[in-house]
Structures are given as structure tokens and as C-alpha cells.
Amino acid sequence: MKKFALYAGLLPCAFVWNMAIAQEQKEDPILLCVGNDSVPLSSFMKGYSQNLLQDEIGRLDREEMEDYLQMYIDFRLKVKAAEDEGADTMRLLQNELQQYRMQLARPYLMDTVLMQDLIDEACRNLHAVVNCKQIVLLLSKYASPEDTLAAYNQCMDIRKQILEGADFSEMALKYSAEYERYRSMGQPLTSTGLEGMTGYFTAFDMDYPFEKEAFTLPLGTVSMPIRTSQGYALVMPVDRRPSLGKMRAAHILVSYNPQDSLLDTPEKMHSRIQEAYDSLQAGMKFSDVVKKYSTDKATLAFGGDFGRFFTSNLLAPDVMAHLLRLKVGDYSEPFMTRFGWHILFLTYAEGVGDCSEEYNRIVRSIDEDPVRSALPFRSFIREKMSGCKYSWNNKVLAQVRSLLPDTLRKADIPSDSMSNPDLFSKTIFVYEGSPRSAWEFVDFLRRGLSGYTTIPEVDVWFDQRVSEFEVAIAMRYELLGMEDKYPEFKAVMEEYRDGVYLFDISNRFVWGKAVSDSAGLESYYQDHIKDYMQPERAQVWMVCFDNQDLAKNVARLLAKAGKKHWSSADLASALAKKFEEDVYLDSNAYARGENPFVDQVEWTVGAQSSVLTDTMSGGCAYVRVENIIEPVPFALDDIRGRVVADYQNYLNDAWVKELRSRYKVTVFQDVFDSIFQK
């Protein structure tokens, strides 16, 4: 009989089922009734199809389906019992269902065109790396309009100076936030041309607005001010190359050393790196050239290898720029940086998979990016909102705002709806005729803050939360009608709900009870103790050896042991002394079928065999039966897992029997028979 599984797991993939049979039916007749609940044929067929292997899909085996029908009836009975016990009011279960509902609804509540654009864009960006120069002006997320405008205008002024010929690196030293600490200390700063350099990065390494500009602007072009999580930024891409993905490399470094007469001048350094390069050109192995010329002690013992796999953002950008030009197995020409003279050797490059290979990674990364992931949903909801009626009660909204101080912490927001019942009971927002109370909005404000966050500009934050509340209510409105709009969504949610209910009630009545009910488990064990008997066993000693040529010598020693009545310890010691590890004594109890030698000897106390051979292993042994141990029960603690499993089956069978007596089950045989008439 084929074994079936009903809701063995509750992951989304568990709900993938073959609809071929159900879709062919123009009608969906009722197959069975459980109590006052009717179950359509399509639900039964979905469950059955889930259990079929790929090559079994479409096959109809009546015996298997009749077996599955009984399992399916048991499943429906348990779900019915869970519903009657109030599973729809249990907070933990309903929270789990709501979380899954939100997850399942995501593909239905987004601008799919925009989402695909984001995926395509991310794929393009993942296949490249870009190095930029940036100037960042810090600005709070909740900065006032005046401060925001001031920062924007300063960015525009800096941009204007750069466009008129000012050096970007010098402007970064003068204005960018990353150098503020040096400026505040009055420390003199001299431009090296690398100031403001981001280093090479790819998709998802930077704030999305910054990334978008970096990958689309022409090289050498200064962007307009970009609003990021840090504030405002100007970005100028300076290099863009295909991504090598994860890579590994080695190098030769010749650095300045005033204590070394061979490296104390730029000319000597250049001469040494040139000698190294000439040696490579002449065919010397890279690792040998490293040993002879490199001054980097950290990599010298490893043939110049950096000692790890890395991506494009690990090395300094002026070094990485040369590595990105190489193919695997190539080495660079000598080049100089602030560290000294280098030759790079690319030993490995994983590359980046095509878009289909990277699809899951891209979607996951978009989901984890709060800015990027919000775009398709906001676009969808704003489109829906444009066709809906909604309005604020500005008077009540102003009253709520008046409750908040100008500098806000979470503790400043009311946490009790009864602290101001007259205000909080008023309607503050109406969406498609559905009123929302002021308390619901206040609670929304409070849930949006962590306990340690301080909001310095409450008006800006408040306006943002007003907009976010609109979107949240519109999202809830769309969620309410999901089952009516999308039949496939309804089907999956019903399956998941049934699975959650089944798991919970089965845990309470069967799985959890079998583990926690120690008295019941002990009683079950005592009532079924004959099922847990140890088999009859022979207590033996065996002298085992692999080489049959040793049989006569072993037999002589055993005869001597018998005459002198040696104990097993004496015999083991004598065997070890005479034969070392070639012969050993095994003194244990074995049941039938557990040892090939014991199975060959007569099970009588005192019985002693001649030399025995195991045809499978080729080993040999002499066996003596010391005692026959009669069957006794296993101790409960020794087989607790087995007894718990049996007790669970017992509880489940008793529970199903009780459910079948509690609820009337009717199977419409003609509907079941129709399955096989196709």
C-alpha cells in the first residue's frame, strides 16, 4: 500500500499541486460531508496529487485512492475539531496565519512591471563594478524643510564649483562628512587624488539611489544631489568594469625602506620591480619571483597570495583597478601606488552567473533592501488609492499632533487608549467608507518607533507617518478582498490554515501529550509490555581471529585454559601475550541474528564449538555458551523514543475513533466513482 503524507510540512512549496484533473471538471461536486461541512472533490484531488511522484501524475489507482480517502477523512475530522474548539480565536494561530497571509499576498500587491525592472536593473549592476568619488553632507532622515533645503543648496554650490574646474578630491577634503573629524581638529589635509573614493562596488553594496546614479551616469559626470540614508551626496563615477565576482590573487610588492640600501630611493625600488617583471617575462614561476623580490612579509611565505577569496571592495581602488583588467593566469605590468610598486597575479575569478542563476539571490536582496523593496508596493498601492475615496479629519489630526512634543521619544506617545478617550474614539481617517479611529493612528505612530529613538523634527516625521498610515490602511483594504479576487490565493490560504490547525490540535491531543503525559506513557508501557521484550540471548565468549592458520595454536591455548579453569580475564591476557592483536576475546550476550558465529553454535549452556568460519567476512572463531538469558522487558528509559512513538499512534487512533463517532461522515460514492470514469 502506498504511504501518504497529509501536511507533513507547512512551507509554501508544500502547496504546489497538480490541477490537471480538477481543471478538467466544469463542476466541482461535493465528495463528502464532515458534520455540517461539505468538502468538494477538487480539494480531495489536490491533496492526492500532492502525494504523487512526478512520473505518477495523472495515474489513478483505485486502491490507493480509497486508502487516501480514509486518511483524508481523518484529516478533515481533525480540522473540524480544531475549528469547533475555537482555533479561529487563538491569537498565536491567527498571528501565524496573518504573517503567512502577508507573505503570500506580496506578489499580488506589487507593481509587477516595476519589480521586474528592479530585477533586471540589479542583474545588470551585479555583472559590473564601479568606482566613484563622492561628497557626503550629513542630514537627518527627519530634518526640517529649512535644513533640507540648506543642505541641498550647499550640494548644488559644491557641484557648481566642480563643474567650473575645482578638483573633486580637494572639494571632498573640504566639505565631505568623512573628513569632518580632521577638519575639526585643524589637522592639515593634502589631496592625494583618492579622497572621496568609494572603492569598487556592485549591486546592493550602497544605498539604492546612490547605486542607481553610479551605474547610469557617464564616467566623469557629477550627479545632481542624491538623497540617501546619510544625507545628500554628490557622486562622480570614475571607472566601471565587468565584475570578476569572488576572486583570488597574489602580488609582488616593492615598498620603500630607508633602512635597506637596496630600497632607500625611488630609483632602486623601480629597478627591483623591473627586475621582478623581467624574471616573470623570462618564464620564472610567480611564487619564485615573490620569494626573490617581494618585500611584503605577510604574503611572502604563500607565494604572494593574499590568503583569502575576496570581492572588488577589499583592495584599495588604485590597486583593484589594475586587477580588474586581468584574466585568470595573467599578471600585470608594474605600477606604483602609495604603498610602493606592485605586480598583481589573478589566480581565480568565479564570475557572476547569468540572470536566471542569480534570480533568487537578486529577489532576496531586493526584499532585504527597505528602499528598493518598498517601490513596487508603493507604486501598486498609490495606483489603487487613485481610484479610491479617502479623507482625513484635519481637526482631529491637529489635536493628535498637539499631544506630541517637538522633540519626541516613544515614551512621549500615549500607550493607553483610555488616557484620552474623547479624542481617541473620534474618527481621524476614512478609507472607502471605513472609518479609522484616532487611537488606531496613535498606536501606529507608537509602533513605528523603537524605545531608543529620538525624533528632533517631529513635524517632518509626523507628515511621513501620515503618508505611511494612508498606505497601510490602503494595503489592509486590498488584503480584505484577496480571497474574492484571486481563487488560487484563497485555495492556498485555506490549505495553510488547515495545516496550522491540524498541527496545533494534533500537538495538543497526540504529539505533545505523548511526551508530557508521563503517567499515561507509563501506563501504556505496562499495558503493552509484551511488545517491548528483549529477545532470548546467549551469553558467550568468542575467541576471534582472521587467519585460519592460527586455529590449531588457538585451540591448544583454549584446551589449556579449560584444564586450568582460567577466567575470561586470564584468557584475554594469555591471548594478547601469545598472539598480540591477531587474536582477541569477545565476551558479550547476543540475540539470534546479531552474530554469525553465535548463530552457528548450539544454544545450550556449556556448548563449545570447533573452529567456525564466517563466509561473509572470512573471519574465524571458537565459541563457548556460558549462559542463556531468557527474554525480559526493556526498561522504559532505554526505549522511551520507541514507546512514545507507539503511544502517539495509540492516542491518534483513539482520537480518530472518537471523532468518527462525534461527527457524521458521509461519502458520496457516485462522486468518488466518477473519478475513474474519465
Image (spheres, grey):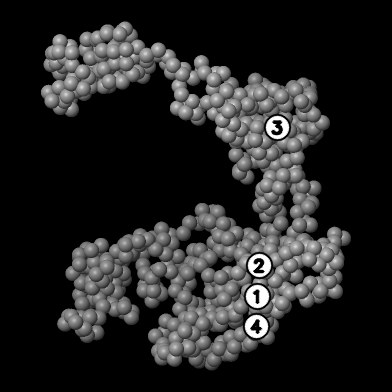
Q: Position of residue 121 (x, y in %)?
A: 58, 64
Could you say which disc has been placed on residue 78 in the image? 3
Badge 3 marks a residue whose secondary structure is helix
> Which residue sits at x=21%, y=77%?
272
The residue wearing badge 4 is: 148
In the image: residue 2, left or right of residue 591: right
Classify mark 3: residues with Cα within 10 Å, few (<14), some (14-19) or many (20+).
Answer: many
Badge 2 marks a residue whose secondary structure is loop
Badge 1 marks a residue whose secondary structure is strand
Q: Quadrant of residue 558?
A: top left
> Which residue sits at x=79%, y=51%?
481
> Which residue sits at x=80%, y=63%?
418
Between marks 2 and 1, how big is the CA–CA gap?
9 Å
The answer to whether the residues at label 2 and label 1 have Cβ atoms under 8 Å apart is yes
Mark 2 residue type: Leu
Between marks 3 and 4, how big is the CA–CA gap?
60 Å
Mark 3 residue type: Lys
The residue wearing badge 2 is: 449
The residue wearing badge 1 is: 455
In the image: residue 460, left or right of residue 201: right
Classify mark 2: residues with Cα within 10 Å, few (<14), some (14-19) or many (20+).
Answer: some
Does residue 261 lie above or below 474 as drawn?
Answer: below
Between marks 3 and 1, how big is the CA–CA gap?
51 Å
Q: Which of marks 3 and 1 is nearer the N terminus?
A: 3
Q: Nearer the viewer, mark 2 or mark 4?
A: 2
Q: Which of marks 2 and 1 is nearer the N terminus?
A: 2
Residue reaching furthest right? 433
In the image: residue 288, left or right of residue 180: left
Classify mark 1: residues with Cα within 10 Å, few (<14), some (14-19) or many (20+).
Answer: many
